[in-house]
Image (cartoon, rainbow, N blue to C red):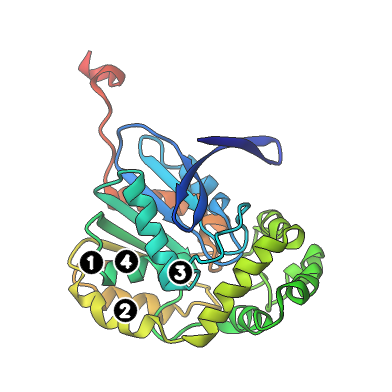
Amino acid sequence: MPSPPIWRGSEVAAVNQVELPAGTIEYQDTGGDGPVVVLLHGLLMDASLWDQVIAGLPGYRCVAPTLPLGAHRHAMRADADLSLPGIARLASEFMERLGLRDVTLVGNDTGGALVQLLMADGDARVRRAVLVSCDAFDNFPPSLTGKTLVLAGKLPPALFGLFMQQMRLRAVRRLPIAFGWLTKRGDAATARWMKPILTSPGIRRDIVRTLRAAAADTRFLVPAAARLADFRRPTLIAWASEDRVMPPEHGRRLAALLPQGQLTEIDDSYTLIPLDQPARLAEVIGDFIGAPRLAESQDPLAR
């Protein structure tokens, strides 16, 4: 079921909805018969993280859900499992509900951690994976940004909301404890992502539940990493060479660990490459998957 469009500056992005046992998930879907690319975002972000990357992938069917990670607009049900492993299962349920197969699964920041959990579980829908500067191994919560957020999650939801009111200020969003080390150029997006958490008690309740579950198991990626060597499908590791939150050494370790891993380092970017270098990221993802085949009616050489 379509939901009302979301305004993003001068542009409007149409959004769909699907009902899952955990609650309502909004998602963007470009449609079409091209190769399927599913893109997962991180904590305190929504699907708009991928807008400019999707624009650089014409011919592919790009599907980007907004997961319940703090910038979602529909609060989840009270009994939903909002731990990060639970949200990884939710992403799998989402792909199943939409009937997606032979997926290239892409994740950035915490979204890359979710991708690793699905890779480690051998999700049959995943044909290829792309890990874009993300939590890995024992790097959780990552750096000052992640540690501050997980610590704040110990507050009751109402006090957490008061604490997050500081994020209305650009000067605060640009601090290393906020988004300052995550993106060079994406402040407009980060300001937009804050709105649900600042205005909705239900969203604050959801993110506090996620952060408390994360604090209770900060090593959840360690056993997953031990199983990644069994993921024998093509995997691209796209890492920001200037990343100050997700160590570039982790990108190299992942590439060496995965049987079909290949590494591309991207310059002039922090962790959120989809905001800082979207065109370059779209280019390397497209090269990795391969060019989509044009339908005969669309191919001028076939006429």
| Left or right for 282, reference 292 | right
Q: Amino acid at mark 4?
A: Leu
| Left or right for 156, reference 84 | right
Q: Position of residue 229 (x, y in %)?
A: 21, 76
Question: Looking at the image, can residue 273 be seen?
Answer: yes
Position above or below: 23 against 100: below
Mark toward the start of the polypeptide (1 vs 2): 1
| Left or right for 264, reference 155 | left
Q: Position of residue 152 (x, y in %)?
A: 68, 81
Q: Residue furthest top?
A: 303
Calculate the distance from the C-alpha at mark 3 to the C-alpha at mark 4: 17 Å
Nearer the observer: mark 1 or 3; the answer is: 1
Residue where numbered disc 3 is placed: 133
Calculate the distance from the C-alpha at mark 1 to the C-alpha at mark 2: 11 Å
Tell me if label 1 and label 2 are in contact, CB under 8 Å. Answer: no
Residue where numbered disc 1 is placed: 122
Q: Which mark is residue 224?
A: 2
Position above or below: 90 against 17: below
Q: Amino acid at mark 2?
A: Ala
Q: Residue furthest front?
A: 79
Residue where numbered disc 4 is placed: 118
